[in-house]
Image (tube, grey):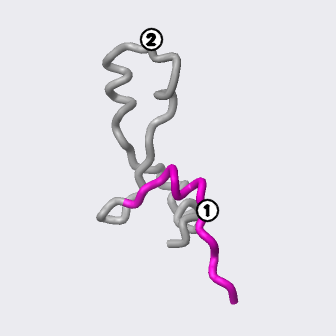
């Protein structure tokens, strides 16, 4: 049986941490930043963990 291929779009957007957690960037941080407060923009810079219900699907897309 053939191996599963890695989904390249997912690979670019989701990173696996050293402990195996799936980490992603927040949305709404690329443009129209003048109307957003500095506090909001600072919180958007942080990397967050993927929600539990999505992790199994994303792991299969990443081939892990």
Camera-side residue: 46 or 5? 5
From the viewer's perspective, is 16 left or right of 32? left
From the viewer's perspective, is 61 left or right of 13? right
Residue under label 1, please give it: 7
| Residue 34 coordinates in the image, percent (x, y) | 44, 11
Mark 2 or 1, nearer chain start = 1
Camera-side residue: 52 or 26? 26
Relative vertical location of residue 16 with respect to residue 3 in this rendering, above or below: above
Q: Is residue 62 magenta?
A: no
- Pick the quarter of the image with the N terminus: bottom right
Residue range corresponding to the magenta coloring: 1-16
Question: Spatial distance from mark 2 to mark 1, Cα to Cα?
Answer: 34 Å
Residue at 41% in and 51% down: 23
Residue under label 2, please give it: 34
Element carrying mark 1: loop
Residue at 40% in and 49% down: 49
| Residue 4 coordinates in the image, percent (x, y) | 63, 76
Residue at 51% in and 50% down: 13
Q: Is residue 5 magenta?
A: yes
Element carrying mark 2: loop
Q: Residues within 10 Å of mark 1 (few under 14, many from 20)?
A: few
Camera-side residue: 12 or 28? 12
């Amino acid at each position: 049986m053939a191996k599963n291929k890695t989904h390249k779009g997912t690979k670019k957007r989701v990173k696996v941490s050293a402990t195996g957690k799936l980490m992603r960037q927040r949305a709404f941080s690329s443009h129209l930043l003048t109307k957003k407060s500095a506090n909001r923009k600072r919180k958007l810079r942080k990397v967050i963990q993927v929600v539990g219900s999505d992790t199994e699907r994303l792991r299969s897309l990443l081939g892990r």
